[in-house]
Amino acid sequence: MARKGKLKGTTEEEKQRPVRLRKYQYLYLIVCEDQETEKVYFERFQPKFPEKTVYITTIGTGLDSKGVVERAIRERKLLSVKAEKEVDAVWVVFDKDDADLNAARRQRFEDAFRLADMENI
């Protein structure tokens, strides 16, 4: 009988078994503006949920607000295909810090909200 857990004879990155996304009751995708801090923050929620109920995947982008929404749309499609089911919730996380510096940034910030609304994000 096969043992659960790590696989023997593989590299460090390959030791964990692949995640079976279809077994999770809910799939959440969180796409963040910041590449590290926000991503790590949201990743810490995964162990708080009972096993196989909620799968949270976080992506740090380093993009502006509209870029984050556009990336979230692409990542939602990829995750849906990989999981063979719909993603339950998609969140985008970005700041307004520099959105008012000039008209172009303000426009991209406003466009991000319109696009997110159209895509149910």
Image (cartoon, grey):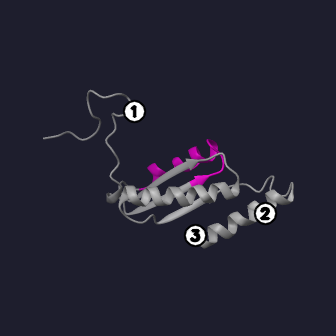
Q: Secondary structure at mark 1?
A: loop
Q: Is residue 119 left or right of residue 84?
A: right
Dividing the picture into quadrants, the one containing residue 49 is bottom left
Quadrant including the N terminus: top left
Callout 3 environment at 10 Å: few (<14), some (14 to 19), or many (20+)?
A: few
Residue 53: x and y, percent? Answer: 38, 59
Compared with residue 107, is residue 57 higher up or lower down, i.e. above or below?
Answer: above
Residue 95: x and y, percent? Answer: 73, 54
Q: Secondary structure at mark 2?
A: helix
Tell me the residue at 17%/40% (across/down). 2
Q: Is residue 47 left or right of residue 113?
A: left
What's the CA distance linking mark 3 and mark 1?
Answer: 34 Å
Quadrant including the C terminus: bottom right
**Rendered image: mark on residue 58:** none
What's the CA distance linking mark 2 and mark 1?
Answer: 41 Å
Of marks 3 and 1, the one in the foreground: 3
Callout 2 environment at 10 Å: few (<14), some (14 to 19), or many (20+)?
A: few
Tally of numbered tags:
3
Of marks 2 and 1, the one in the foreground: 2
Give the extent of the magenta segment: 31-49
**Nearer to us in this view, 87 or 114:** 114
- Mark 3 or mark 1: name the one nearer the start of the chain: 1
**Pointer 3: what residue?**
119
Q: Mark 1 and mark 3 in contact (Cβ < 8 Å)? A: no
Dividing the picture into quadrants, the one containing residue 94 is bottom right
**Rendered image: mark on residue 107:** 2
The amino acid pointed to by label 1 is Glu
Q: Secondary structure at mark 3?
A: loop
Compared with residue 90, is residue 61 higher up or lower down, i.e. above or below?
Answer: above
Magenta-drawn stretch contains 32: yes
**Pointer 1: what residue?**
13
